[in-house]
Amino acid sequence: MEIKAKVRYLRMSPRKVRLVVDLIRGKKVSEALDILTFSNKWAKKPVIKLLNSAVANAEHNFELQKDNLYIKAIKADGGPMLKRWMPRAFGRAGAIRKRTCHIEIILDEIKKVEPVSAKKDSGEKVEKKVKSQKLKATPRSGAVASTTKAKSKESLSDK
């Protein structure tokens, strides 16, 4: 089961964020947090925050354990640029592009475990299968067909 989280419009260059993101791709969550904690890059703060958010989504929404998660995919793409101007010599202006980025993370389970709510749903599906098998097991006789025809004629005559 894939768990997703995103950071959008982060005021940091995607090139700088990719240096941090590439360190943790494919790692277990606990190992990735250790790597990020001791990293010496400014981009580690939003990436740690995003990773913690994804883990919270997994624990709260899907009832998964933090120890059973790994980073399946993580990417840092460019966002919109803020364009500013800086005065230059001879009355010219130089463009400054203040870049933003979008970071997306996808977590997945190491060992596939069904959550508690899914086990309850599977029990209901078993009951439905048993009922459908009972319906299929009944013989198709003319009496059943005639009663359905009689009911349909009654409903037409009522109108």
Image (cartoon, helix red, strand yellow):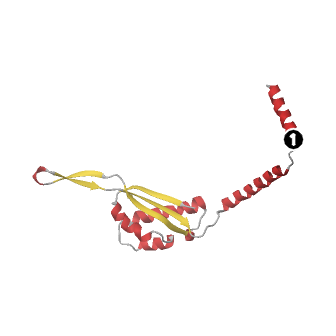
In this rendering, the answer to whether 159 lies above or below 42 is above
The residue tagged 1 is 144
Which quadrant is home to the N terminus?
bottom right
**Going by the image, does 141 lie left or right of 100?**
right
Q: Residue at x 30, y 51 (%)?
A: 82
Q: Nearer the viewer, residue 35 or 3?
A: 3
**Going by the image, does 137 lie left or right of 29?**
right
In this rendering, the answer to whether 122 lies above or below 112 is above
Q: Nearer the viewer, residue 145 or 68?
A: 145
Question: How many circles with numbers are drawn on the protein?
Answer: 1
Q: What crowding class fits label 1: few (fewer than 14 Cα within 10 Å), some (14-19), or many (20 or more)?
A: few
Picture coordinates of residue 64, whole percent (x, y) = 59, 65
Picture coordinates of residue 43, whole percent (x, y) = 37, 65
Q: Residue at x 80, y 28 (%)?
A: 156
Q: Nearer the viewer, residue 53 or 89?
A: 89
Which quadrant is home to the C terminus?
top right
Q: Residue at x 58, y 58 (%)?
A: 61
The single residue placed furthest to the right in the displayed view is: 143
Q: Residue at x 56, y 62 (%)?
A: 58
**Going by the image, does 95 lie left or right of 139?**
left
Picture coordinates of residue 80, whole percent (x, y) = 34, 52
Q: Nearer the viewer, residue 132 or 17?
A: 132
SS for callout 1: helix
Query: What amino acid is at disc 1?
Result: Val
Picture coordinates of residue 26, whole percent (x, y) = 48, 70
